[in-house]
Amino acid sequence: MPPHVVFAERLLAVLTGERPVHWMLGRTIGDAYEQLVRLAPDNPLRPAAARRARPVLRHCGGVPLRPGVVEAYASVVTDARVRAMAFRLEQGPDRRWRCAAVDLGPAGP
């Protein structure tokens, strides 16, 4: 799987509360971890009712900005709503991809 799809699934797991934020330690750089620390407690992508199905990625894409940098986006279906998620990946000297930024945009109504 492309790295942006792998990271979209990882971010989804954290933002639904399935995984703790510290699961992303070592997979983030810069402000990305702090962004997740601020976002995750509200579980912004968790379904409204406990019995609802886990949110799923509907579409995920990535645009290379330059070698080793990808701007990625995903649409996430949760309940009957579709939410947008954007994130940036950067490849380090060790060739591992790390998340450098995360944005969910407005929560909507």
Image (cartoon, rainbow, N blue to C red):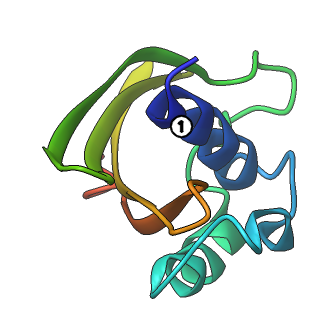
Query: Disc 1 designates what residue?
Result: 8
- Badge 1 local density, few (<14 within 10 Å), some, or many (20+)? many
Question: Residue 53: x, y in percent?
Answer: 76, 15
In the foreground, 74 or 64: 64
Is residue 19 something that shows in the picture? Answer: yes
Q: Is residue 76 positioned above or below 38 on the image?
A: above
Q: Position of residue 51 (x, y in %)?
A: 86, 21
Q: Can you give x and y, in whole percent of width and height, for residue 101 in the image?
A: 38, 69
- Looking at the image, residue 34 sits to the left or right of residue 105; the answer is right
Out of 100 and 74, give the one closest to the viewer: 100
Residue 1 position, x and y percent, is 58, 17
Residue in the picture at 52% in, 19% down:
57
Relative vertical location of residue 89 with respect to residue 12 in this rendering, above or below:
below
SS type, badge 1? helix
Q: How many marks?
A: 1
Whether residue 80 can be seen here: no
Residue in the foreground of this view, choosing between 108 and 2: 2
At a point 51% along the width and 27% down the height, the residue shown is: 5
Q: Above or below — where is 25 with respect to 16?
A: below
Which residue is rendered at x = 52% and y = 34% of the image? 3
Residue type of the residue flagged with mark 1:
Ala
Q: Nearer the viewer, residue 12 or 52?
A: 12
Q: What residue lies at 28% left-to-right and 47% top-to-bottom?
A: 70
User: Compared to 3, does 29 lie above or below?
Assistant: below
> Which of the 4 image quadrants contains residue 98?
bottom right
Is 93 on the left or on the right of 15, as rendered? left
